[in-house]
Amino acid sequence: MTQTIKNFKKVQNALASQEYLEAINILNRLLEIDFKNEMKYLQLRGEAYLKSEQYELGLIDLAKVVEVDNKNIPALVNFSAALIRCNRQPDAKDILEYILELDPENFDARINLCNVYQTLGKSEESLKQAFKAIEIRPNAAIAYNNLGTSLGELNLVEDSRQAFLTSMTLDHEFMPAIINLAQIEIKNDNYDEGIRLYEDALKNKKISPNQSELVKYYLGFSYLYQGKLDVGWENYEYGFGSLLPIASLRSTRKFIQPRWNGESFSAKKLLIWREQGLGDEIEFSTCLFDLVDMNVEVILECEPRLVSIFQRTFPKFIVRKEALQADGYPQFDDFDVQCPIGSLPRLFRKNLDSFKINNTRRIEVSKEKINSFNLKLKPYQNKILIGICWRSGLLSIQRNKHYTSIVDWRELLSNPIYQFINLQYGDCEAELIQIEESLNIKILRWPELDLKNDLEDVLALIKNLDYVVTIGSAVSSLAGSVGTKTFMLTHKNWMLLGQEDWYPWFDSVVPLVAEKNQHLAEKIKLINYYIKS
């Protein structure tokens, strides 16, 4: 018994000195000999696993503890944290709300629930939790940091900035506030200041390995925004870190196969796998032409809507939809090395000149479908055919400032020499009817055409158009991929790679870049000029 007490004190000392692996090793021994205190040891080991960033192991231990004692608030709080780290936010939400039923003044539960609500898109609920946490601990830096992130989600940028500054006043080395303040500066187009904050954070001795990866990933976007492609793409590789918000993660996929980093190989199969959104996948797919030229065996796992399109375009590839098991590992074991599609630019687009090599190669569109839409559009051949997309299909406070309303297009839509075709997916029929009645025009659309899911048809339709005018969205990527002249209404962003007068990814896309405080609608008036010229 005396030895058990000594070992337990060693655990406490190891935890206090942040020697978490040492604490775990001692707890492993205690669990083998002292069954009476099993739950206490499991709780401590679960906490040590969390601190050492072994989140799944921590989740297993803490789940056993709370199953035995569902009113053990410290264990419940850590259990919720483990759920968050394992990307199980809905489950974490339920646990945290239960904790607050038991203890409404629990500060840690308020902080964690604030973060979970943000991830789940419940911005107003998140803000309420942030204010409640400040009421409980008015001098806590983390509380003001959470307030800042909540305000940022509501696009209250200056209020968010002041909250982060307050957090740093309370603790000038509180790393999350430093990182978030840098993001606010970036959001305000103060890139030099944002980069300075990021780079200073990397020099801070208190930064953890995971925080360092987070900062490097965010720095990657800033460098790419400035056109510093080499260092930008290198930092972009940190986009798989465990501290990244779910929305920012490049992917949660897992592999036992090694990553391919451009080295030469023979008699091996390379898996290229999808990540992020449809538009990014299409833009990154321009690098697949470089793989064609290398004459390597490629398996391409892509968005299901793109399978037939990519198979036609890359006939030597094996193309299939993304195939995952429940644990995040691949469903198939028929490849030797793997690479995410978003990592191909690091290998093939190291400078702006490298974009010019393959940016005229196009996605292959079904000739049969092209002919089908050609017949549908034949009655309008005496007019200039223009496809339009004025907003995203997903609306939010954060997204809306980057988009337009269809009423902003009134002057362009009134021009009788144009025939407009709707490319806006989602629920937009009421908007279309209203503008048609207001201007006495007809915007072409077909009820049977699913603009979100029938990409074969969408590409064939776009291929028949003279122009596309769109905000920066998947539509601009689709139009660019088939070579249709496209005017993209956008603010400065990292995908422009520091350019404003040309779009590196597709030579047929013309970026119309709004200034910092300029609304995108101001750029619509330029379309007539560009078409005439």
Image (spheres, rainbow, N blue to C red):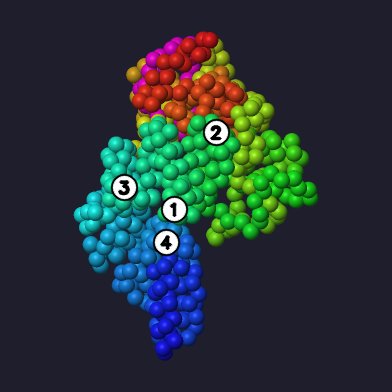
Q: Could you classify mark 2 by the number of other residues whose Cα lies within 10 Å: few (under 14), some (14-19), or many (20 or more)?
A: some
The amino acid on which the numbered mark 1 sits, given as a three-letter code, is Lys
**Looking at the rendered structure, which numbered label has been put on residue 228?**
2
C-alpha span from label 2 to label 1: 26 Å
Mark 3 lies on residue: 168
Q: Position of residue 74 (x, y in %)?
A: 33, 69
Q: Of marks 3 and 4, which one's residue comes earlier in the chain?
A: 4
C-alpha span from label 3 to label 2: 30 Å
**Looking at the rendered structure, which numbered label has been put on residue 205?**
1
C-alpha span from label 4 to label 1: 28 Å
- Is disc 1 placed on a helix, strand or loop? loop
Mark 4 lies on residue: 83
C-alpha span from label 3 to label 4: 28 Å
Residue 204 at least partly seen: yes
The amino acid on which the numbered mark 3 sits, given as a three-letter code, is Met
In the image, what residue occupies the spot 37% across and 33% down?
Answer: 188
